[in-house]
Image (tube, grey):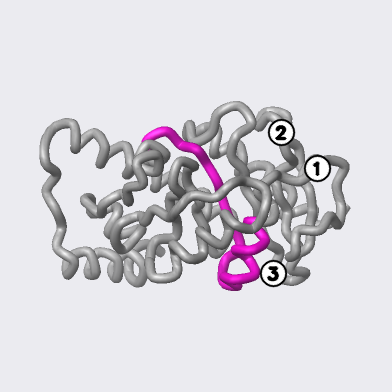
Amino acid sequence: MLLEKLRKEVCDLHAKLSENNLVAWTSGNLSGRDPETNLVVIKPSGVKFEDLTPDKMVVVNINGEMVEGDYKASSDTASHCYIYRQMPHIYGIVHTHSRYATAFAVVGQAIPCLTTAMGDEFGGPIPCGGFALIGGEEIGQLVVDTLVDSRSPSCLLQSHGVFATGTSAEKAVKAAIMTEDNAAIVWTAMQLGTPLTISPTDIDKLYDRYQNVYGQ
């Protein structure tokens, strides 16, 4: 079986999406790209998260063509692979319809950077791109176009949901979790009144500290 370690990692990380209430039923998916072979491990289409096992993961090449697997690959496979081809530093992609973030997507609105946690993680607002139908590369094209001028690892797509990227599959999951957490905070604050803002200069300082100094 190809890429056993990556298959297990991608399978296990799908459980994090459920644990953090980012997905419902079979919606959403996660993929990881192997840096040595450039092959992609992705969720099988329409399989419930609790039924996923490493051997059910699907392996495709960078163009989305089947390499190994007993199931059909996710309907978002072409878009994941487009993103990998256009953003070679990316090795993990997560797609969710998480509730609060998708609410912003439904009205075509970016999530404004109103918390220090957003400044740390995203370096500004989480942008919202346009609309595309599922099945081809069009969604991937929108994600790349939306992220090209942003420091954010994730974006929203109009009327659809969240696409989060990372230099590993785990970091993409983290970005998806933080996107939803901050979307919930911002939405709640908007119900209480007019949220206070953080200056662009302070956002830059927060981002630089978190990316270059924070942690071990």
Give the mark nearest the N terminus, 1 or 3. Answer: 3
- In the rendering, at what x and y percent does residue 157 appear? 46, 49
User: Does the magenta portion include 88?
Assistant: yes
Q: Which residues are magenta?
A: 79-100
Residue 74 in the image, given as x and y percentages of width and height: 71, 44
Residues at marks 3 and 2, CA–CA distance in whole angstroms: 27 Å
Q: Which residue is mark 2?
A: 46
Q: Which mark is residue 35?
A: 3
Binning the other alpha carbons within 10 Å of mark 1 as few (below 14), some (14 to 19) or many (20 upward) gives: some
Q: Residue 174: in sight, yes or no? A: no
Q: Regarding mark 1 in the picture, which secondary structure is present there?
A: loop
Label number found at residue 57: none
The answer to whether marks 1 and 2 mark residues whose Cβ atoms lie closer than 8 Å is yes
* Amino acid on which the number 1 mark rests in the picture: Lys
Question: Residue 56, position in %: x, y?
Answer: 80, 40
- Give the CA separation, mark 1 to mark 3: 23 Å
| Viewer-side residue, 83 vs 166 | 83
The C terminus lies in quadrant: bottom left
Give the mark count.
3
Q: Residue at x 83, y 40 (%)?
A: 71
According to the picture, the residue beneath numbered tag 1 turns out to be 72
> Quick one: 210 or 134, which is closer to the camera?
134
Q: Is residue 52 above or below residue 137?
A: above
Residue neighbourhood size for the residue with mark 3, other residues' Cα within 10 Å, grouped as few (<14), some (14–19), many (≥20): few
Amino acid type of the residue tagged 3 in the rendering: Pro
What residue appears at the point 59 percent right and 57 percent down from the top-left corner?
A: 138
Disc 1 + disc 3, Cβ < 8 Å: no
